[in-house]
Image (cartoon, rainbow, N blue to C red):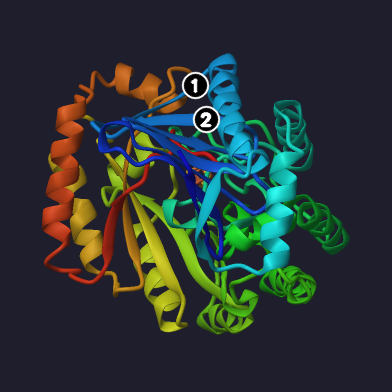
Amino acid sequence: MTKKVFFKKDSVSIIFNEDSENIYFSTFDYEFRLITSFKNPNLYRRGFDNKVLLGNVFSNEAVFLEENESNKVLNEIYEDAIKVFSSKNFHIEMKAQSDEIIEYFIEKSKNTTFEKVVLDSENFRKLYKPISILPPDQYLAFYIPITEGCSYNKCSFCNLYKDRPFRIKKPEEVSNFLDNITNYFGKSLLTRKGIFLGEGNVFVEKTSDIIIAVRIIKNKLKQNEYITFEPENSFSGFMDTFHTKKELDELIQLRNEGINKIFIGLESGNEKILDKLLQKPLNTSNLITTVNNIKKAGINVGITVLVGVGGKELEKEHINDTIQTLFKLKLDGNDIIYLSPIVEYPNLTYSILMNELGLTRLTSDEIKEQTRIFKESLSPRFPKTKISIYRVDKFVY
Ligand code: SF4
C-alpha cells in the first residue's frame, strides 16, 4: 500500500496504516530523528538520547522502555520508514517545506542505518549532560543551559541535579557549546520552538551576565536559517524566589532582552510543609511579590504545585493554603499552573521524613482526586490560565 507522507514546516509524518484498528504513523524531524510513533494502541516518544517512553491510549500511564526494548522498537520503526523512501512507495500529501530540505530528508533517510541512529544518540550524550527536566510546554524548546545544576539543590524531594554542582558558565563556554549543539541539531532546529535556559534557578545569575549570554545566543541564532521562532522573544527558564532577588527594573531589562516566560516551583502554599517536609526555604509572601513583579514586567509565568505532598494528614492544609496563595497571583491567559504529582525516591529526605512523621501516602486515585480539587477550585478564579499536569518522571528530550 502506498504510504502517505506529510512534509510539514517543522517535521515529517508518515502514515503507514490508516485502518482505525491498526493505525500506525511516525513523526520525524528533518534530520530523520524520530520524535513520536503511534502503533495502535501504543504511543512511543523518543528522546535524542534514544530513550523511549511508552504510553497507551487507554491510560494516562507511561513507562520508559529498557535499552534492549527501546532498540528493538526503534529499529522496527526506522526500518519501516527507510523502506518507504528507498522503495519510493509514498505519496506526498503535504509539501510545506522547500524542495531542497525535502530532498535532504529523503536522501538522509535512504542512507540511514540503525547503527547510525545509535551513534547519533551517543553524539547527543557527549554534548549534553542528562537533561533532567523541562516544563511540558517547553518540551520542544532548544535547550541551552547557561548554568549547570541547581543553586540550592537541597529540597528534600528533588532528585534533578544531585549529580552535578551548581556553576555559571562563562560567555566563551556558552558560545562554544552553542556552536557545537547548533551543528548537531542541524535541520532538527526546524522543530524547535523557543529557547530554554538551564538549569535549576538559572535566574540566580547576575542580570547583566544573563544578558551577555542571551545576546550571544541571539546573535548566533540570528544567522541560522533553520530557526523558525523569534529568538528576540523566546527565552524561558527556572527561577527560585528565595535566593534570586530580581528588582522590577531588572525584570523589565530581561523582558526587553527576550525573556518571555519564567517557571517557579511553589510546591505548596503551606509554610510548615515547605519548611519541615520539603525543606524549601520559600516564603509565600516573597513568591507572591516576585510573581506579580514578573507579570508587571510583561513576562509570563508557569507555577508548579506538588500534588499529594504531606499525605492524608496534611492534605487539607496543603490544598487550602496552596489555593489561597495562588489566588493572590495576578495570572492571565498566557500563564500556566502546573499540577505535578509528587514522585518519591526512597533514598531522599522527603521519603524518610514521611516515614518518620508517620504520614500516609495518597493512593493514585487520591492523587487524581486532589488534582481534580485543585483544578475545580482554581479554574473559576483563573478562567483563562491553563491548568495542566506535569509529570517530572515522564520526561524525554
Ligand atoms: S526543587 Fe528546584 S530549587 Fe529545589 S533542589 Fe530541585 S531544582 Fe533546586
Percent position (x, y) of residue 127?
Answer: 78, 42
Percent position (x, y) of residue 356?
Answer: 32, 17
Percent position (x, y) of residue 273?
Answer: 30, 40
In the figure, residue 49 lies in which quadrant? top right
Locate the N terminus by quadrant: top left
Q: Nearer the viewer, residue 324 or 107?
A: 107
Q: Nearer the viewer, residue 203 or 77?
A: 77
In the figure, residue 228 lies in which quadrant? bottom right
Label 1 is placed on what type of residue? Answer: Leu
Instruction: Give SS at disc 2.
Output: strand
Q: Please tell me which residue is depicted at 15% across the width and 29% down the height of the picture.
A: 365
- Residue 313 in sight from this viewpoint: no
Residue holding disc 1: 65
- Residue 198 in sight from this viewpoint: yes
Which is nearer the N-term, disc 2 or disc 1? 2
When the figure is inspected, residue 244 is found, relative to residue 105, above or below; the finding is: below
Residue holding disc 2: 52
Q: Is residue 373 left or right of residue 232?
A: left
Q: Circle 1: is it few (<14), some (14-19), or many (20+) Cα within 10 Å?
A: some
Q: Would you say the residues marked 2 and 1 are in contact, meaning their CB atoms lie under 8 Å apart? A: yes
